[in-house]
Image (tube, coloured by chain):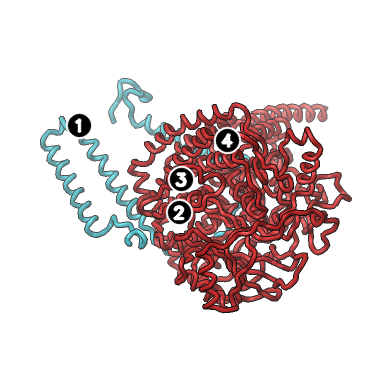
Chain colours: A red, B cyan
Amino acid sequence: MGNGRAAEMSQVENLVQRNLDTIINWSRKHSLWPFFFGLSCCFIEEATAFTSRYDIGRFGAEVFRGSPRQGDLLIISGTVFKKMAPVVLRLYEQMAEPKWVISMGSCSNSGGMYDVYSVVQGVDQILPVDVYVPGCPPRPEALLQGLIMLQEKIVASERPSRAVFNLGKGGQGTTGPLLMDGISKSRDPRGPGYEGIPVRGSSVSPPFFADNRADRMWTPPAKRKELSPGDQRLAEVLHSLFAAAVVLQADVTDMMTFQVDQEILPAVLRYLKNEASPRYERLEDLTAVDESARRHRRDLPDFTLVYTLLSFSSASRVRLKSGLQGASPDTASICDLWPSANWYEREVYDMFGIRFTGHPDLRRLLMPHDWEGHPLLKSHVYRATQMTPYGLEDARNHQALDAAAFFVRKNDQEYLLNLGPHHYSTHGVVRFILDLHGEEIREMGIDLGYHHRGVEKIGEHQSWHQFIPYTDRVDYLSGVANNLTYLSAIEAMAGIQLPDRAEYIRVMLSEFFRISNHLLWFGTFAQDIGMMSAVFYAFREREMIMDIVEFITGARLHPAWFRIGGVAQDLPDGWQERVADFVKIFPKRLHEYEALTANNPIFKARTRGIGVLTLQDAIDWGVSGPNLRACGLAWDLRKKTPYSAYGAFTFDIPTGPDGDCYSRYLVRMAEMRQSLALIAQAAKEMPGGRYICEDCRYTLPEKQETLRDIDSLIHHFVTVSRGPKIPAGETYFATEAPRGEQGYYLVSDGLNRAYRLRVRSPGFANLQILPGLAKGITISDLVAILPSLDYIMPDIDR
Amino acid sequence: MFPSEYGAFSAVQPDLLTMALYFLMVFGLMAVLLFLTSRLGEKKPTDLKLSVYESGMIPAGTARFSYPAPFYLIAIFFLIFDVEAAFIFSWAIAFDQLGWQGWLRISFFIFILLASLVYLLQKGGLEWATAGQQK
């Protein structure tokens, strides 16, 4: 009798609980609150999902919450970096209960294409995950699908009522087990089933170069450049001044190059900057090469330091190389000559262990402060899957440096505030540390490296061809404009001539991406200043561009569509109509944007006279792109050193009057008009003919040809599987990317991949001026300056 | 105090009882909500969760120190002038009944307000520029 009663009671209890579960689950399903959190490219598609076209609000996940306290859905969108993982974990812990996790994109799912020392091979090693959204990046619709799957999971398998009434047991939120690389999931970067087959790139891995077939391939030597009369004069002057300490390099493909003795290097640089004619005003790039894995060492030093200088007046560059001996050699800092050398030298120290005496603050720049080794040394491990798997304990133990470590002095009237790595207005994962006195910023420190994807190391291990998709992700908003820089460098080195049609297609698509990038900049810039609606308008037109890009290339953010010597396919039928539609509609839309902002008194008050950068500072700090032009200098590589087909186009270089936030706004808005004009010209004058060059030594043959004759098929096979061999040499090639001058410095050892691949990114130089601009202003002005510089973290941290 | 011909619960002519009931309902609702939030739901207070959210970093230093806050002054001034607008509104509603005497009084009141604003400006109470902006 008693038993029956108890059973009846528990039956009633079960009934109540089941009904409560249903009600709670239903409510939760329709009111998930995503936390505003993004790591890299995937976040752009996540953000697109809440704009009007995709409207994630339809699924009840309306407004992204800025604080972890208010969110219950964590969408890990992008690459989980080892430096960032402790932050991801802390944010997750700080979210309210119950909480759910969606892993968005290949990187977050498994490390994706970034099996490299700085990347965690899947967020499920530190957090439980409910839904994995595949893609690189997944489309916004894919994220919506992931959200629906999570909703279904909540309804189907969660029993929250016991947890809600604190009765123990039950189950809610994401509770899945943590996985471990090599223990509970496959460590093979290619997935299971490939055991016993050497990992890609092993044939070119020093010191063995096992079964390397590049040597059996013949190419003509790298292209040679004749020195101009101006260059020759300068070489003579340098020779007379410094005698044998400066040696002109005989074979160059891109610019005049000198071998300089390390002791007199600062003196030579000083002369070139201040006295030479023409004067080389800008330190374009400073990097190093670890020569230890050269196949033929000959008389090469252990390291070569490479300084690239730019002269505005003659639109020419010069390269100085200086050899260093020893495992961690010393050399003199040139921070007193160019302030911008500060970060460059820190990066070289971080990546190679080369010390710079006289540097004011020689610390690691990109890697975590407790990292062991210097990643770009040939002896440093490359793949994350060759290292101890990164797990929960690592994420708990490796904490970032305390904010106080970034400043020398600190009195008790001042307050240290971390702005980032997770913050609305940092536009990516970067950590600004503000030393505040009241509302005033006294001092500012920057902690980089939260987005370090080891791209330069990857470049040394992927074939020339395979690296193309990585370039898309260097500046993930500029898409194929990144391909263009990298491929132009290869083509310059190998002397590949492109058919006109390919050049025009490249120009047209690169300009589409410039507009797309500027649209996103416009939306976020206006939003940071307090105008919510701009971003929704801007994304509307951006989607038009994405549609055109997808129609032509088949992908949205990262088409990886350019190929060595041309592009991947011909333009599809019907492209003219779509491009013409956009060219017709866009000017009106631009006019609408300007009506919203240009004469808006609040917008002007927030931007005019704020963050003024003088032209001299801009040049000294190596600032480029719209930020430089906003200071009044009409410097645009598309005009000054025309590359690709730009020489055949007519367009203007918009410049700004004052170098403030408003000028930077004006320049970018005007640039969108110019880009539109370029697109219209390209579409109108699109030449016929091949879309990829005929030189099959380096390029993929046209697809139709591979289906027709065996010669083309063989070339296709070799280029795809082995990758082309590029003749030994070095070259630097810079283009005017949407954010400024992006340059690739490639060193080839005559193999099927780069010996050293260096990315000179515009953002790196553009962001370094920030502490100078931030001094003495308020946080609200800083928030206006940050987006006005239009930097992006993957190209700063690379 | 004012016996109502509509009864104590009248919405047309509210009296003290209605107000008391209203307050009772407000407090009752608040008490229920607070009680439920404190009792219901899963709580997992870990050190990390209870730590301060500062862009995902561990905050540096203490939050207990003297901190210059010019915004505080602006906020207080705003509050003062804002509240005084309420007097002007209530005069404006009944300005015809209050007559010239009312007009004179409110004019005097506004004059005092203006004078205090001028005084504030002179004392630099509304200045809020950083070193960078003064440049």
> Could you say where residue A265 lies in the image, as x and y percent from the top left?
56, 74
**Which residue carries the number 3 mark?**
A525
Kindly report which numbered mark, 4 or 2, lies closer to the viewer in this rendering. Answer: 4
Q: Secondary structure at mark 3?
A: helix
* Circles 4, 2 touching at the beta carbon (< 8 Å): no
Going by the numbered disc 2, the residue's amino acid type is: Trp
Mark 4 on the same chain as mark 3: yes
B44 vs A535, left or right, is right
Q: CA distance from mark 1 to mark 3?
A: 47 Å
N-terminal label among 3 and 2: 3
Mark 3 on the same chain as mark 2: yes
> Could you say where residue A606 lies in the image, as x and y percent from the top left?
37, 49
Specify the label residue A687 is tagged with.
4
A277 vs B74, left or right, is right
Mark 1 on the same chain as mark 3: no
N-terminal label among 4 and 3: 3
Q: In the figure, A114 relative to A131: above or below?
A: below
**Which residue carries the number 2 mark?**
A635
Chain letter of mark 1 equals: B
- Circle 3 packing at 10 Å, graded few (<14), some (14-19), many (20+), is many
Q: Secondary structure at mark 2?
A: loop
* Circles 1, 2 touching at the beta carbon (< 8 Å): no
- How many numbered circles are shown? 4
Going by the numbered disc 4, the residue's amino acid type is: Pro
